[in-house]
Every structure is written in structure tokens, then in C-alpha cells.
Amino acid sequence: MTASIVFDGVAKRYGSVDIIPDFSLSIGAGEFIVLLGPSGCGKSTLLRMLAGLESVSGGRILLADQDVTALPPGRRGLAMVFQQYALYPHMSVFDNMAFGLRNIGIADAEVRRRVEDAARMLELDTLLQRRPAQLSGGQRQRVAIGRAVVKEPKAFLFDEPLSNLDAKLRNRTRIELARLHKRLGATMVFVTHDQVEAMTLADRIVVLNGGRIDQAGPPMDIYQRPRTRFVAGFVGSPSMNFLPVERMADQQGRIAVRLPGGAVVTTQIAAKPIAGQLEIGVRPEGLRLAADGPIAGCVELLERLGERSLAHVGLGDGTVVVAEVPVSSTLAMGETVRLRPDLEQVHLFDGAGLAYHAEPRPDGVPAEALVAGATAAEVR
């Protein structure tokens, strides 16, 4: 069984402090939603209100079109997996997974069927007689997930369940969660501050900032077309590079800007009125080494990461940008380099932090031709 979830104008206040002022979101049955944001943005509070562990100050929560705002947790038909495993140390894996079912009077035969089915799914079937102290951290987390699976809930809620695992176990458990979602087709709401978890697990990511939604959408939409500067800076590792720019005369219907070093770049962003101090943003993979690039700086740090290499380049005004360089590059720290932005990957942010994105490049015009003020007409 799986169900849709609707947050309808939900608010949470502690005294006069608004933690979540007005939150609305519809989650489809069977959808995997990730609530992503920094500490204090309200994501765990939203999950706890959905579970019934926190009261709602305003609005309502619907589960399968039923208003559950005032229902106690046990009557909502939800299963929650916490950051802490909270397993009973004196009980076997089987008994830990069966405990909640026995408490509500499920017949022994049905309890055994559900536990054994979940154990096979989570590769715990050979560990059912062990106690938590005999398990690894990843196995304990799988037991906690199995305890939720056996309830056959309307939806699964995950509150940063991978935070206590080391990197290798976190990667494996993340894959197991994705497989679990595919097998069960269940509605899942997952809270995290880890953007890698969000990008790899979610059908949709909901980026939260100060209790509000900055952007909601498929992972690659969030990454490639961020709606705000906050989203652009939060999603992506390393973070997007930002440079203050001065707007120049538009070129062939495109916005042209002067970079801090004085070079003029004609972006692929359609000309329109934009207010406030402007910044351009470009991700590391959108900055490349080029002998005649418009951005000059000194290599302060090289990160050799195996599948990619990153150069941290200090500019004349003290800003540091990160550029992806060829793995085979012979760059050395202290070397002077020039960088060229891929104009199709350049974003513009206005004074309010709203984003403007590139349009397709004119046919037959290379990116290099649109740097330093050249226009499509001049190239042709």
C-alpha cells in the first residue's frame, strides 16, 4: 500500500518565532522525495510533523486524501527510520524487526512472513538470530530499515538515516535504499543535508531555505537550472563559482558583462531588465584552461581526485574559483593560468538572488567567438 501526501499551508511556530511560515507541497503516491537543506532550515521539523511527532501550528497534512493533522502517530500508517538505530540490544535481529508487529497483535505466522520477506530483501536473512552488538553499523541500519518495511506502511519517512555510517557503508546503503524503493514502489520522504544522497536517490528534490521552498524539481533540473543563488551555491560539490560583474551594452539580444579583470563576455542569456548588483555563476566543469581565456589567476591548490582534477585559482581581487582541469594536466601550484567559461553553463544572478539561464548558442558560432565582446553577426 502506498499513498500521496499533501502539505497544505503548514506552519510551525515556537512562541513568536516562525520556524516554517507557510509550507505547501504535493507528493505523489510512490514518489521518492528528498527534503534537502542546511541545518536549521526546517526539514526534520516537517518530517516530524508528518509523522505526528510534532504539533502543527497552522495548515493541514493529508495522507491518501485523509486529513491526518490531528491524528496520533500510531494511527497514520507511516514508518519512520531515524539517524540513530534505536535497536533493542538484548533482542535478536528477528525480534527487533518483529517487536512492533507483535505489539499491535499481528498473528505469529504473519509476523514471521513479513520479517523473513524483509530480511531477504535487505540481505539480513542469515543474521536473524544475531544481536545488534554482533552487527556492523551498516547491518544495524538495515535492521532499522527492515523494522519499518515489515509494517507495510503507507509511506516511509527517513530522517538522515545514513549520517552515522562511514563513506563506504553510506554509499552501499544508499544503493540499497534505491533498490528498496524500486521493489516496493512505496512513497518515501527522505531528509538530508547531503546533496550526493539527494541527487542519487530522489525523483524530486525540494531545496529548503529558512523554512521555505527555494526550488523543487528533478535532480538534474536543480543542478543545471537553479532558481536562486542559494540553490546554485548549495547544490554541487565543489560549489558553483560566483563573480561580481558589471552589465555592459547588450549584444545581439544577449546580456554582456564585464568581469572583475576587465574582460567583456557576451553571455547566452537573453537581454531583459535585471535589477541590483549582478553576479555570474559557473560550475567548475564550466571553467576550462585556455591560453587566451578572459579570467587570469594563480593556481593555489590542485586536487587530484582520480576521475577528475580540480584547480583552485586565486584571482587578482582575492576571489578563488575552482576549475576542472584534465586529469593528465601537468599544472603546478603557483603557476599562472587563464580560464574560459563555457557560455552555455554561465548563469546570471540579480540583486535578489534570482537566476537567469543561458539559451542555446546561435548555430555555427563557437563559444570562443562570444568572449571579449564579439557577436554572432561579427563572427559571420
Image (cartoon, rainbow, N blue to C red):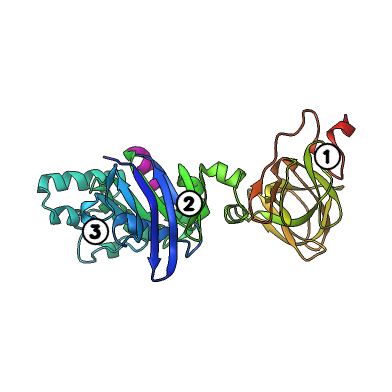
| Alpha carbon distance from label 1 to label 2 | 41 Å
Question: Where residue 140 appears, x then y in whole percent?
Answer: 32, 58
Element carrying mark 3: loop
Q: Nearer the viewer, residue 303 or 273?
A: 273
Q: Are the residues flagged by discs 3 and 2 in contact, CB closer than 8 Å?
A: no
Observer-side mark, 3 or 2, equals 2
| Residue 313 picture quarter | bottom right
The quarter of the picture where the C terminus appears is: top right
Circle 3 residue: 130
**Label 2 amino acid?**
Glu
Question: Where residue 33 appears, x then y in whole percent?
Answer: 42, 46
Regarding residue 78, the answer to whether it shows in the image is yes
| Residue 161 picture quarter | bottom left
Circle 2 residue: 197
For this view, does 208 lie left or right of residue 296? left
Element carrying mark 1: loop
Q: Nearer the viewer, residue 316 or 122?
A: 316
| Residue 141 picture quarter | bottom left
The residue shown at (79%, 38%) is 367
Circle 1 residue: 251
What secondary structure predominates along the stretch shown in magenta?
helix
**Label 1 amino acid?**
Gln
* Residue 182 lies in the magenta-colored region: yes
Of callouts 1 and 3, the N-terminal one: 3
Question: Where residue 170 appears, x then y in whole percent?
Answer: 44, 55
